[in-house]
Each structure stands twice: as structure tokens, then as C-alpha cells.
Image: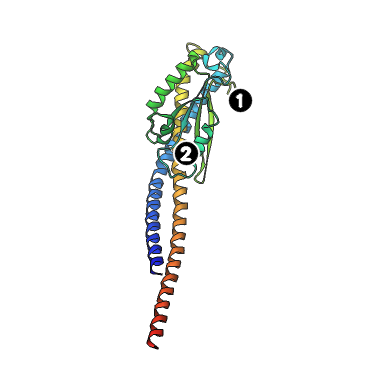
Amino acid sequence: MGVDTKKLRNRIKSVDSTLHLTTAMGLVASSKIRKAMEAMLKSREYAGMIEKVVQNLANSKECAKSPYMEQRGEGKTCIIVIAGDRGLAGGYNSNVFRLAKQYPDAEFIAVGKRACDIFGGEYNAEYFSFEQASALSKKLCSEFSEGSIDRVGIISTEYISMMSQEARISWILPLVRSEETDDMTGIIFEPDELSVLNTAVPLYVAGMIVAHVRESFISEVAARRCAMDSAGKNAKQMIDDLQLAYNRARQSAITQEITEIVAGSGM
């Protein structure tokens, strides 16, 4: 019986150590949420505005000649895969990689340490800068306009709420005409609409990359916070159950010892 209580005591200590770890990681994730949320909202606003401008230009007849409007089918696909810098975030990373597996013939560009471990690269998701996005955008736009790649997409995670995040893919090149457009009557473009569109597209692609990275990062932090909260609750419940089993084992051992003493005294 003594061996059983010792194992239970060691198990309680082990789970308690895990509880301290999950609590600490949950606090770190909580401390990053506000800053990550602010960054996401700002990047969403920027991306939304430049996307609106590019979409309005893409809907004009003059811009149909732009290389960024050329529809070449699925052809050679390049996909930016945005995953986390760390694990212990529930299904956050696995959902992204599961979606990436649906495009086995694509060329992948990784953002986030977990994605870099699989696809190669050195982009950090938490500290990904607009300068890095601009350099990546120029490269992708150049290759697309030259015909080296036929479409460009981004696999990221959409932030729905603290409790819900969803992996998705968004196609950013080629541009697609939309039925919804603003009235551009009276707007004069210099030197012309086509030149403005071709100049704006690299900024648009960079803005979309940054927006998806920022949204993926807040999704990672939120997923880790929820995962650590859940792990903490499970650890507490496990400690309670183990403590109960330990107390019962101790009580049984003491009862056995008393019984043996009483039996011995009667001899």
C-alpha cells in the first residue's frame, strides 16, 4: 500500500508542475492579446482600403490589359502558409497544415517557425514586418507578371472570436473583376488607370500579406490561451481526483495498521 501512495504523491506533484506551466503560458498569451488585436485591426483597415481601390481599378475596362488581370487557370501555384511560432495552441497549426495538404503541387512560402520547420524559410510570424512583406510582394508580383507563377494564395487563420478561429485560403492574384464597385465618375488618374493599377498591386499584395499574418497571430494567441485554460482546468480536476485516491489509500493503510496493532495486542 505504501508503494501506491508514493506513486500517487509523485503523480500529484507532476500534474501540479504541469498546472504551473499551463498557467504561466496562459498568462503570457493573455498579455499579448491586446497588442495583437490592435495590430490586427489596423492592418485590416489598411488592407480593406487598398483592396477597395485596387478592386475599383480592376473593374475598369482600361485595366483589362494589366498582367495582374490575366486568368491562367490553376497552373503553377504559389501559396504563402502562415502558421505559429510555437506549439501548444490546440489545433491551430494542424488545421493550417491540413489545408495546405490539399495543394500538393503548390510552391509554399512559410511564415511562422512551425511552417518554416516544414517548408523551409526564416519568417517569424510575431515580428513579421511590412518591409518583409513588401520585399516578398515585389518578388511575387514580378514572377506573376513574367508568367513564372499563375496564381498566388495565402493560407492563414481567420479570427472569429476568442473561442473560434478557422483556417482558410485566400487568392490574391490574379485580380478578379467584381460586380460591386464604387462610382468613379469624375476621378482622374495620372498618367492613366492601367499605370496606377500596376503600381498599386505590389502595395495591395503586401498589405494583404501583413493583414493575414496579423490576423493569424491573434488567432494563435487566442487558441493558445483557450488551450492553456482547458489544460489548466483538466489538471486541477486530475489533481482533485488523485488527491482523493491518495487520501483513500492513506486511510486504508492507517486502518490496516490499526487492525494489525489491535490484533497483535490481543494475542
Quarter of the image for residue 7 reads bottom left
The label on residue 114 is: none
35 and 155: which is toward the camera: 155
240 versus 60 height, above or below? below
User: Residue 193: x and y, percent?
Assistant: 52, 14
Disc 1: CA contacts within 10 A as few (<14), some (14-19) or many (>=20): few
Name the residue type under label 2: Asn
150 and 201: which is toward the camera: 150
User: Residue 43: x and y, percent?
Assistant: 45, 32
* Visible residue check, residue 144: yes
- For the residues labelled 1 and 2, say whether their Cβ atoms are less than 8 Å apart: no
Q: Residue at x 47, y 52 (%)?
A: 230
Which mark is nearer the camera, 1 or 2?
Answer: 2
Residue beneath label 2, please?
Answer: 93
Gap between marks 1 and 2 measured at Cα: 34 Å
* Visible residue check, residue 157: no
Residue beneath label 1, please?
Answer: 180
User: Residue 188: x and y, percent?
Assistant: 51, 14
Quarter of the image for residue 251 reads bottom left
11 and 62: which is toward the camera: 11
Q: Secondary structure at mark 2?
A: helix
Q: Secondary structure at mark 1?
A: loop
Numbered label tally: 2
Toward the bottom, the furthest residue is 266
Q: Quadrant location of the N terminus?
A: bottom left
Name the residue type under label 1: Glu
Q: Quadrant location of the C terminus?
A: bottom left
59 versus 14 height, above or below? above
N-terminal of the two: label 1 or label 2?
2
Toward the right, the furthest residue is 179
Q: Residue at x 41, y 43 (%)?
A: 34
